[in-house]
Amino acid sequence: MEALTFGTGKILSHAYIVASQSEAARNQAVLEIAGAAVCSGAGALKPCGLCRDCRKVKAGVHPDIIQVRRETDDKGKQKREIRVDQIREMIGQAQIMPNEADGKAFIVQEAETMNPSAQNALLKLLEEPPGGVVLILSTAAPAMLLPTIRSRCIELNVNQDAPALSDEQRQEVVEYLKYVSTGRKSELLRWCNEKAAHTDTAGTIEFVKSVKTIVTDVLCGREPFCDLKREQLWLVLTLLERCEEALSVNTGIKHIFGLIAVKSIGDGAPEK
């Protein structure tokens, strides 16, 4: 690929990790890079925002921008992982010439959900990238990606100016994660029952967001690592995203904290 520049004039590379707690911020950065990969406007600064390709990117219909994400099952529920056969299919598509543009962009959404086999398969594309292909890994938790993947990508951390948590919010999260780390389900249940009895809907939403913020920061390396293993942190993050979805449809507070009490500690974890 001819050396092109995008955004603030950086040289367009063949592989990026775009990391942020904010999905909106990630998507904005991802589309800028993908747009640069397919832009046909005159001049080196990409994307131009004016050419046919840029207009198609904005409309979400460009055939040379391919997205890979978790599939859904026959009940319409999103699967937990991006599987290795999805990545192998993407690698095969990367060998095919672009449909309209001079280049192609492949976007892996929630890249941290790629299972180990999928991540290992992706290394082939990173080690031998076809000309004109740009790979973009969008993630809230780059620490979940293999070091060998991260070392081969340019990592962009966006939207790092999120408001800091108050001391009270941080203390609540620390208490919750402490109970999760001990594996004492009965103590976590008592703590959750106490929270449910003294927290309104707004406070519950605030708590869920605070936990997600700190856990994501730990996974991204912006917070000191706590006593939980990465697998446990990922379980907590997935659970709190489920709770956030439930709160958006007015699920009761007792149900939310009941879910947190039951599901925060893995089914196979013994009572300590």
Image (cartoon, rainbow, N blue to C red):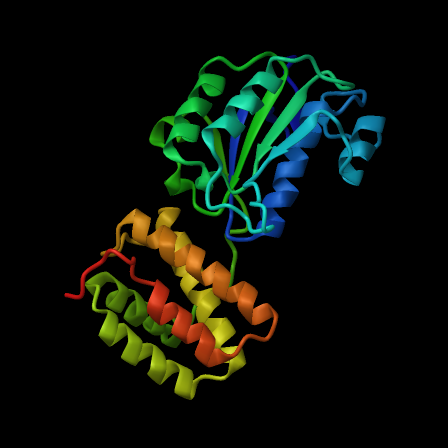
| Relative to 242, residue 122 above or below | above
Q: Quadrant of residue 127?
A: top left
| Relative to 260, residue 230 above or below | above
Residue for point 57% across, 24% down? 90
**Residue 48 visible in this rendered orientation of the protein:** yes
**Position of 257 compared to 68: left or right?**
left
Quick one: quadrant of the N terminus?
top right
- In the current view of this chain or complex, which residue is farthest to the left? 272
- In the current view of this chain or complex, which residue is farthest to the front? 74
Count numbered badges in the picture: 0
Quick one: quadrant of the C terminus?
bottom left
Q: Position of residue 205 (x, y in %)?
A: 51, 72
Could you say which is closer to the camera, residue 72 or residue 96?
Answer: 72
**Position of 174 compared to 38: left or right?**
left
| Relative to 220, residue 256 above or below | below
Residue for point 61% across, 28% down? 106
Q: Quadrant of residue 191?
A: bottom left
Residue for point 58% across, 51% down? 75
**Position of 148 compared to 33: left or right?**
left
| Relative to 65, residue 262 above or below | below
Q: Position of residue 170 (x, y in %)?
A: 36, 69
Could you say which is closer to the camera, residue 171 or residue 48?
Answer: 171
